[in-house]
Image (tube, rainbow, N blue to C red):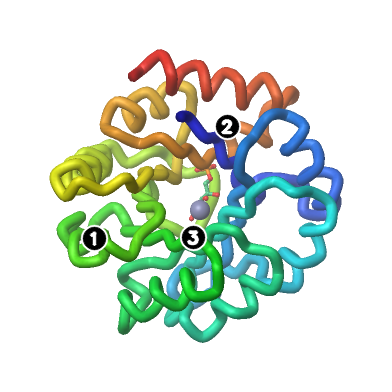
Amino acid sequence: MTIISPSVLSCDFSNMAFEVKKTAKAGAEYLHLDVMDGAFVPNITIGPCVISAIRPHTDIVFDVHLMIDEPIRYLADFKKSGADIITVHEEACTDVKATLLAIRELGCKAGLSIKPKTDPEKLRPYLPYLDMILIMTVEPGFGGQSYIHAATDNIRAAAAMVKEGGYDIPIEVDGGITTETITLAAKAGASIFVAGSAVYKKPDIALAIQELRNAAEAAK
Ligand code: DX5
Ligand code: ZN
C-alpha cells in the first residue's frame, strides 16, 4: 500500500489549521511533522505545543519526525500532543533500544531514521522494536533540497534486511521526493513517501498527491 505523508514544513505556517484540514481532504494518509531542535540539525521548527494546537482540526495520522538530540526526554510530551507515529534518529540517541521501547510503551508506533551517510547496518539490531524505518534522502534540516541519489542504496539495503529477517516493517523515505524521484524510492522498496515542496508548492495539492501516488504505484 502506498502512503503519502505531506511534510508541513513547506505549508503556510500562519494558517496551519486550514492547511492541515486541506491536506487530509486532499487524500493524504499521514501528515509529516518535522521537529528540529537547532542542535541535532541546524534549524529550529515546531514542538509539542504546535502539534497539540492543530490536533483538534483533523484525525489524520500524525507522523512525527524528531530531529532532536536524546528524544527520549520528550516522548511523553509528543504523545500527549497527539503523535501517532514517533520517529527518532539512530544518530541522536545514546540508547536507541530504550527510546524505541519507550515510544511503544506510550502507545505510539516507533520509527527509526538514518541520515544519508549512516550505514544502514546500524538499523539491524533494532528491527524487533520497529514499526517503521525512515530513510533520509537529504541531509535533515531543511525542506526543498534535492534527492541524494546515493541514498537509494540505503532504501534497498533496509528493504533487504527487513525481508531477510522476516519482518513486516514499512520503509518511509524523506527528502527531495518528486514524481521522478519517488519512482526510484518505490523501486528500491519504500512504501511511505514524505513530500513537502512537491505537495505544498503546487497550486492543487490533491492533484499533486494523486500524481505522486500514481508515480509510486506505476514503479512497483
Ligand atoms: C528535512 C525534513 C523533510 C522535509 C522534506 O529535514 O525531514 O521532511 O520537509 O521536504 P522536501 O519534500 O521539500 O524535500
Ligand atoms: Zn521529515
**Residue hosting label 3:** 109
**Residue hosting label 2:** 198
* Residue at horizontal 66 percent and vertical 71 percent from the top: 47
* First along the sequence among labels 1 and 3: 3
Residue at disc 2, secondary structure: helix
* Residue at horizontal 36 percent and vertical 52 percent from the top: 133
Q: Vertical placement of 104 versus 187: above or below?
A: below
Per the rendering, the mark at residue 123 is 1
115 horizontally vs 29: left or right = left
* First along the sequence among labels 1 and 2: 1
Amino acid beneath label 3:
Lys
Foreground disc of the pair 1, 3: 3
Toward the viewer: 118 or 112? 112
Q: Is mark 2 within 8 Å of ligand 1?
A: yes
| Crowd rating for badge 1 (residues with CA inside 10 Å; few <14, some 14–19, many 20+) | many
Amino acid beneath label 2:
Ala
Specify the quadrant of the image occupied by residue 43. Answer: bottom right
* Residue at horizontal 40 percent and vertical 75 percent from the top: 101
Per the rendering, the mark at residue 167 is none
Residue at disc 1, secondary structure: helix
| Crowd rating for badge 3 (residues with CA inside 10 Å; few <14, some 14–19, many 20+) | many
Residue 139 x %, y %: 38, 55
